[in-house]
Image (cartoon, rainbow, N blue to C red):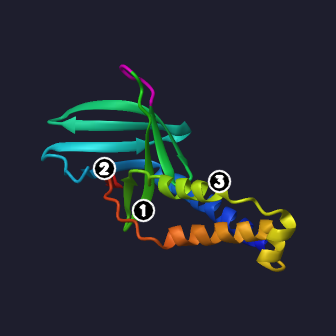
Amino acid sequence: MKTFTTLLALVLTATFTLTAAAQDVAGSWQAESVSSIEPPEGAALTLSFGDEGKATITYTLAGESQAWQYDYAVTDGQLTLDPTKFFGEPQTVTYDIKFDEGKLLLLTPKPKPAKEEAEETEETEGAAKPDTEDAVEELGEEEPDEASAEEATEEVEKEAEEEDTRVPVWVLIKA
């Protein structure tokens, strides 16, 4: 029961955080830098996140503006932009979202750890899988579901503790 309560708390926390992130993204944001480069003097780059999942990127130079329309979604701490009018093959762009001192940072998504999964697969291929009774004996009185839930919780906490050293692709301030 303790495991269920812990997992429920994690899910609810994530849900409320994602809802808050989606609400915080809404509105207009002025680009402070893109790929660590500031817009030139007299130029402005704005991202506007509107209702119904519509976003607009507007570039203004010497009073002349050009805009691109996107559909956007905020899920699992990520912002996904899909072009609504495109030339050639459309490219969907996904960024991780991070808020820092009133700034919205759009980061490239963290790569998935492919090496760890491959190593685990190699290790488990040769080993015989223990039956449920053996697993329960090895774990003590805990059931396998509880052990895997605790491992998942520990993994989430470990990932949260790791410092994110990625450089933001977009640094935006509220316009």
Label 3 or label 2, whichever comes before in sequence order: 2
Label 3 or label 1, whichever comes before in sequence order: 1
Q: Residues within 10 Å of mark 3 (few under 14, many from 20)?
A: few
Task: Give amino acid for label 1.
Answer: Phe
Residue at the spot 49% in from the left edge and 50% down from the top edge: 78
Q: Where on the picture, by quarter, is residue 126?
A: bottom right
The residue pinned by badge 2 equals 30
Q: Does 138 appear above or below 60?
A: below
Left or right side of 124 for 94: left
Between residues 127 and 78, which one lies in front from this camera angle? 127
Give me the C-alpha separation between circle 2 and circle 1: 14 Å
Residue found at the very far right of the displayed protein: 133
The residue pinned by badge 3 equals 125
The prevailing secondary structure element of the residues shown in magenta is: loop
Residue found at the very far bottom of the displayed protein: 140
Left or right side of 122 for 138: right
Mark in front: 3 vs 1: 3
Magenta residues span 83-88
**x and y, in percent, of residue 75 in the image:** 56, 49
